[in-house]
Image (tube, rainbow, N blue to C red):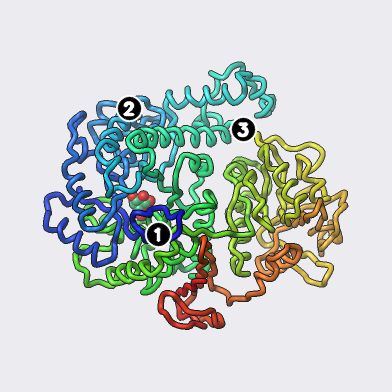
């Protein structure tokens, strides 16, 4: 096992998940049986306490931790480690009754009633105080417990609160950001427009639904503030716990493509990234492999936040969820494939929500390892136990990481700016989809990409794609210039560099902030197409690509023209260009082209890199995922068949999972080769 393993004391991949024994305290027989079954399924971890507040403090100041301590001890005696959650994600009734300020005020200005979860005010001093008291107790009791290997802060942070305290804090945030100078803010938000100038910071409100929603600057800063305030809440919890043991790592579980929080800001306070993955396998709108490619993008996004460490798959489900439009079973074998995809992509854990199905309430039909049937003689249990055995064989991958040489830039700020902008064609901006589609094109060529921010260090990459990089944050342009000058190959697409960090348009032509020189082109106009409209792009080597949705008209082209438009009044003008800059290359794609054409363009770009062209020559069949985890002494190549057909992959060596020489993958099969 490598030195950088997240949990050296466990010595293997974590296999476990959310466990809610507090729902079964009146059934000691079931709790006893749980331990037996966990061991049988190869479970070595349980996440406890996520929603336990009302059982830990049934009335204010009356604490009862005995049941929790007994369970942690019992699990530990049986070789099962605990990840201990703080219960701040859901509040007991007494708390909401006595301290209404803990409850959120919604966008309409109405304070919510008690109920549901994940809906506390992040600012409320009283709530923070009550959470701190609770966390002190947890820290005291479990900070040095050898069976408790990590803190799990709250649960799936999200949402916003519009109470007076949050409004005040937002104003303070703005005051600080704009150096106490309201004119700076007025300029940044272009407030002379519609007579929106403020005289002082106290006139500013967040974007209430019956208030100001037309100020893009305001909306964007509100989102940034919400992230900062949430991160601050999370950090306060971590600081309390770390007083009791600075070495115990902390995480909080992120969500799939969640847009309400900039995870790259929150990430900084966490020791490890963890996330919850619930894709819609076997849906009726895409191929199964596409669902896997989508999930791969999400894994890559999470992994890339801390590139030098493994991440954690904190939640997933062994069978079905209860909240999709159609709650479909995973077909036999697919569960194992999903688990191994996470491991292949850098996760050192495979965790579930949840161990045992509850009898009642909102999630009574949510899948679990143990069904209402209560037996280990089920398909799901057998598949989970099989995963348990398989993960044991892979214990040496713990601590290894992926060392990718290609990346895709993905920024929350650009994502948010697209939500606010009044331009283009609203239904087709599709920033996320565009990034995912480039990721997928690269994956199909056998090249795994990291998903990084526009100000991330890019020096490890030979090739970087910047899809629809509409907003240039302060450091973006300098970062990209540097990257290209030092030999990087950069492919950017339409909608690049229109606005600065405040969403003010650049003057003198897009892309702004000096990027025109990097690409050797200026964007003069952008044409949006109706859904049925098409154009073409003709390349200098005779290819014709279909254009849909967007076409930019370029001018002042100093770059080499790789392709021109085939139609419309801009027929013959440049559509794809390539500029040599320093020792690198900057390629600009001015129109949205389909995935097959994208692949051809990418192959051209890879030809400009040092090693990546030969990488994609490996030519694995479509729908086979390929990842390499690298350690100090070994590398592990993973081959995953995302499809329902057998795939020939050539002789790749001996598979660690079967111990056999392998040259073909059966449907859903995964092979791992150690070097
Ligand atoms: C997650 C959440 C869990 C559980 C699960 C159901 O988002 O963290 O508590 O509700 O969804 O799929």
| Direction from residue 64 to residue 566 in the image, left or right | right
State whether residue 668 appears in this view: no
**For the image shown, how many numbered marks are present on the structure?**
3
Q: Nearer the viewer, residue 555 or 245?
A: 245
Q: Which quadrant holds residue 337? A: bottom left
Q: Nearer the viewer, residue 291 or 527?
A: 291
| Direction from residue 144 to residue 410 in the image, left or right | right
Please identify, in this view, whether the residue under mark 3 or under mark 1 is nearer the observer: 3
| Direction from residue 581 to residue 71 in the image, left or right | left
Q: Are marks 3 and 2 in contact (CB under 8 Å)?
A: no
In the picture of the structure, the residue carrying the numbered disc 1 is 325
Residue at 49% across, 31% down: 208
Above or below — where is 182 with respect to 232?
Answer: above
CA distance for labels 3 and 2: 33 Å
Q: Name the secondary structure under disc 2.
A: helix
In the picture of the structure, the residue carrying the numbered disc 3 is 217
CA distance for labels 1 and 2: 39 Å
Estimate how packed mark 1 is, as few (under 14), some (14 to 19) or many (20 or more) residues with alpha carbons within 10 Å: few
Above or below — where is 168 with respect to 474?
Answer: above
Q: Of label 3 and label 1, which has the lower sequence position?
A: 3
Residue 195, horizontal then vertical, whole percent: 66, 23
In the picture of the structure, the residue carrying the numbered disc 2 is 129
């Amino acid at each position: 096992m490598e030195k950088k393993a997240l949990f050296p004391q466990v010595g293997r991949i974590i296999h476990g998940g959310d466990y809610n024994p507090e729902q079964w305290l009146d059934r000691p027989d079931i709790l006893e049986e749980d331990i037996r079954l966990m061991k049988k399924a190869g479970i070595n971890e349980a996440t406890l306490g996520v929603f336990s507040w009302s059982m830990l403090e049934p009335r204010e100041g009356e604490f009862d931790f005995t049941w929790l301590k007994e369970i942690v001890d019992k699990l530990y005696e049986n070789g099962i480690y605990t990840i201990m959650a703080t219960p701040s994600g859901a509040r007991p009734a007494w708390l909401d009754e006595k301290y209404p300020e803990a409850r959120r005020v919604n966008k309409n200005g109405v304070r919510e009633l008690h109920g549901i979860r994940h809906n506390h005010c992040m600012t409320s001093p009283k709530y923070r105080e009550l959470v701190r008291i609770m966390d002190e107790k947890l820290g005291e009791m479990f900070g040095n417990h050898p069976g408790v290997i990590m803190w799990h802060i709250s649960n799936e942070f999200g949402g916003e609160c519009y109470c007076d305290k949050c409004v005040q804090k937002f104003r303070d945030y703005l005051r600080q950001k704009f150096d106490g100078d309201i004119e700076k803010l007025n300029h940044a938000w272009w407030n002379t427009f519609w007579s929106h100038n403020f005289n002082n910071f106290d006139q500013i409100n967040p974007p209430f639904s019956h208030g100001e929603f037309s100020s893009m600057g305001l909306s964007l800063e509100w989102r940034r503030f919400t992230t900062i305030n949430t991160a601050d809440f999370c950090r306060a919890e971590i600081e309390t716990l770390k007083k009791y043991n600075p070495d115990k790592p902390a995480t909080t579980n992120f969500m799939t493509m969640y847009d309400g929080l900039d995870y790259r800001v929150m990430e900084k306070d966490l020791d490890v990234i963890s996330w919850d993955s619930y894709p819609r396998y076997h849906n009726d709108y895409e191929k199964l492999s596409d669902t896997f490619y989508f999930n791969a993008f999400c894994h890559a996004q999470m992994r890339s936040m801390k590139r030098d460490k493994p991440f954690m798959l904190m939640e997933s489900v062994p069978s079905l969820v209860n909240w999709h439009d159609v709650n479909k079973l995973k077909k036999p074998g697919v569960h194992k494939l999903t688990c191994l995809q996470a491991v292949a992509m850098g996760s050192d854990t495979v965790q579930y929500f949840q161990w045992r199905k509850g009898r009642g309430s909102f999630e009574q039909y949510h899948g679990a390892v143990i069904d209402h049937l209560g037996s280990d003689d089920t398909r799901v249990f057998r598949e989970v136990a099989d995963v348990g055995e398989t993960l044991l064989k892979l214990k040496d991958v713990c601590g290894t990481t992926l060392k990718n040489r290609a990346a895709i830039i993905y920024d929350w700020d650009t994502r948010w700016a697209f939500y606010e902008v009044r331009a283009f064609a609203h239904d087709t901006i599709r920033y996320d989809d565009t990034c995912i589609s480039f990721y997928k094109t690269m994956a199909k060529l056998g090249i795994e990409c990291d998903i990084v921010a526009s100000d991330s260090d890019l020096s490890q990459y030979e090739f970087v794609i910047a899809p629809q990089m509409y907003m240039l944050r302060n450091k973006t342009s300098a970062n990209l210039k540097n990257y290209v000058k030092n030999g990087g190959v950069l492919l950017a697409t339409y909608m690049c560099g229109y606005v600065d960090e405040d969403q003010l348009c650049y003057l003198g032509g897009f892309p702004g902030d000096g990027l025109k020189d990097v690409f050797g082109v200026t964007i003069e106009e952008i044409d949006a197409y109706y859904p049925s409209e098409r154009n073409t792009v003709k390349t200098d080597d005779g290819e014709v690509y279909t254009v849909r949705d967007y076409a930019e008209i370029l001018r002042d082209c100093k770059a080499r023209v790789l392709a021109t438009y085939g139609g419309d009044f801009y027929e013959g003008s440049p559509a794809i260009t390539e500029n040599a800059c320093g020792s690198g290359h900057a390629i600009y794609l001015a129109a949205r082209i389909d995935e097959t054409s994208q692949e051809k363009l990418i192959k051209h770009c890879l030809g400009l890199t040092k090693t990546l062209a030969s990488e994609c020559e490996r030519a694995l069949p479509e729908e086979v995922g390929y990842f390499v985890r690298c350690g100090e002494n070994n590398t592990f190549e993973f081959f995953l068949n995302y499809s329902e057909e057998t795939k020939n992959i050539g002789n790749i060596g001996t598979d660690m999972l079967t111990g056999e020489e392998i040259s073909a993958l059966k449907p859903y099969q995964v092979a791992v080769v150690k070097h």
